[in-house]
Amino acid sequence: MTDESYPVTRTDAEWRARLTREQYDVMRRHGTERPGSCALNHEKRRGVFQCAGCDQPLFRSGEKFESGTGWPSFFDPLPGALGTTTDNSYGMERTEVHCSHCGSHLGHVFPDGPKPTGLRYCINGVALNFVPEKEAVR
């Protein structure tokens, strides 16, 4: 996490109680789920993908695409939903994306996505909850 403050804050114990072990590892410790391990990678219904840490809407299903990477991929987030930081782990520089509401690590963004943005938001599925359109708040 960064030193930035967020509208949603929780103690470490509260995060551990709210999230599964895998979610905690990814969202609070910057881990990565195994590629192809999350059912949301195959989610095709209309709806909204939300942060599993605070329920903030992050992506609409219409911005999701099959990238072949094994992680849910999107080409455009909802306005103001994400923040970014530079990630220098693994001997390379990448752009990490996190929830702008609670600071939870979601994944990374790369400049090899489809038009119109040319971006690929490669997101850990365990960091997301999916709400089908009929249930999503408009």
Image (cartoon, rainbow, N blue to C red):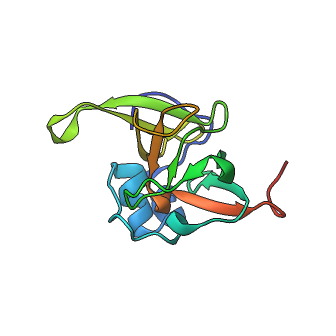
| Residue 112 located left or right of residue 65 | left
Most foreground residue, 84 or 8: 84
Residue 80, picture quadrant? top right
**Residue 32: x and y, percent?**
33, 56
Q: Horizontally, is 71 left or right of 116 in the view?
A: left
Name the residue located 66 percent from the left edge and 53 percent from the top edge.
Answer: 61
Residue at x 82% of width, y 63% of height: 135
Whole-percent x and y of residue 107?
Answer: 41, 46
Q: Which of 66/133 is in front?
A: 66
- Write the residue at 54% across / 63% down: 18
The one nearer the camera, 5 or 106, is 106
Question: How many marks on residues?
Answer: 0
| Residue at 55%, 57% in the rendered image | 128
Most extreme residue toward the left is 91
- Image coordinates of residue 115 in percent, x first then y, are 55, 35
Image position of 54 (left or right of 1): right
Quadrant of the drawing holding the N terminus: top left
Q: Relative to 97, does residue 133 appear above or below in the rendering?
A: below
- Where is residue 3? Give x, y as percent: 41, 28
